[in-house]
Amino acid sequence: MSTSNDAGHDEDLEDELTEWTVPNIVTTLVPLLIGLSILQMVSGTVLETFEEQLLEHPALLIIVPVMIGTAGNLGSIMCSRLSTQLHLGTLEFSPTNANIQANVAAIMGLAATVFVLLGFASWAIGRALGGTLGLAPLLVITIVSGMLLAVWVVIVSTVSVYGSYRLGYDPDDTTIPVVTNICDITGVIILFAVVSVVL
Amino acid sequence: MVGHDSAVDVYKQALPVILISLVAGLFAGTLLGTETMREGIESVPGILLLLPAFLATRGGVYGSLGARLSSGLHQGLIDPHFEWNDRLRNAIIASFLNGMIVSVFIAVLAWGVLLVLGRDGSLLELVIILSIAALLSAFAMLGVLLTVIFKGYRRGLDPDNVIGPVVTTVGDVFGVVFLLIGISVAGAVL
């Protein structure tokens, strides 16, 4: 408390920025969340379409939340790193740029780690829940869809950070939530594209 | 070439968060894969359809409440002790309303999509399930979030670093459990 007393004595200006009223918060957030829910119906429709296979193979149901969460996380890591480097002035949008290369390699490494672990975990838990899907198809599904996802995350994040920079928007404000949700949704689409090829 | 990170540094920094979200996702996924939940999914058309939107809403509502409270603490707008004042009360009531309004909207939306897909769905059933799930989520998430933020802040944890993982971990697991409870209640009532 005491640390911030020296700042912000201009009460009128402060009130504008810090007014937390119920109508303010609700009218800002509800339209945003409604737009988001409409977008999320795309991945919901994919899940609903594959309902029969999901119910038959619990291992696939186990993969879904991890896929969604990891996709969003990888997207937000890539975006926030790129936009921080943009702010610091150390970013240059070129495939030979050392920063971009390091981020891409790290995203690939993170995806490989998570999706190999997920292959084993979904197999073991799926077995315990009465599923019959073998380890090999599950590893193929998690690793192929995970690596495709990582490539996609890299492309979407780089393009949107670059785009918002060119258009003059701060990527921190809008890009990250948008990219996170796009990655969430495409994660499910990629997963079931691979599932329909493998199974 | 000063100031660029190596791939290994980035990997090491990000790994803990990614692994936490893996474990949380596995918890939520295991709950989804249980016999009871699969029966629920089978008996109520539209559960899988609304699942991603429902889980994303939890992140949106409580992630933004967390970010707001954490900025408020840093700015000295709210005290690091839990006490009812207008600001805190407004932020909590608003996030409660956000969660309820958007969840009911998702139920209606999912019902509409079911119609378009040519499937049967009960609007009343979906609204009951999501209202119950949203109500229980609100109590659980508010409880966890307020405890973590206020206790964490007093112990020197920067809430900005804690909110993300807490909201995603707790949100997904609770979200699936409360959907299941909603399905059983709706089954008993209807």
Image (spheres, rainbow, N blue to C red):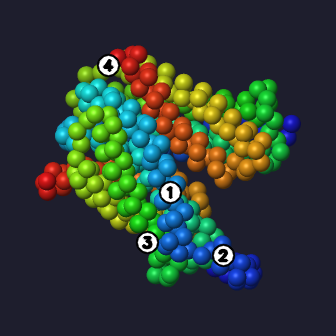
Residue at 76 percent across and 44 percent down: it is A167
Q: Residues within 10 Å of mark 1 (few under 14, many from 20)?
A: few
Q: Chain of mark 4?
A: A
Q: Position of residue A3 (x, y in %)?
A: 70, 77
Q: Chain of mark 1?
A: A
What whole-number distance in Å separates the C-alpha atoms at marks 2 and 4?
A: 59 Å
What whole-number distance in Å separates the C-alpha atoms at marks 1 and 3?
A: 17 Å
What whole-number distance in Å separates the C-alpha atoms at marks 2 and 1?
A: 21 Å
Residue at 39 percent across and 32 percent down: it is A46
Q: Which residue is mark 2?
A: A16
Q: Which residue is mark 3?
A: B93
Going from the N terminus, do you reach mark 2 or mark 1 first?
2
Q: Chain of mark 3?
A: B
Please state which amino acid type lies under the numbered disc 2: Glu
What whole-number distance in Å separates the C-alpha atoms at marks 4 and 3?
A: 48 Å
Q: Which residue is mark 4?
A: A134
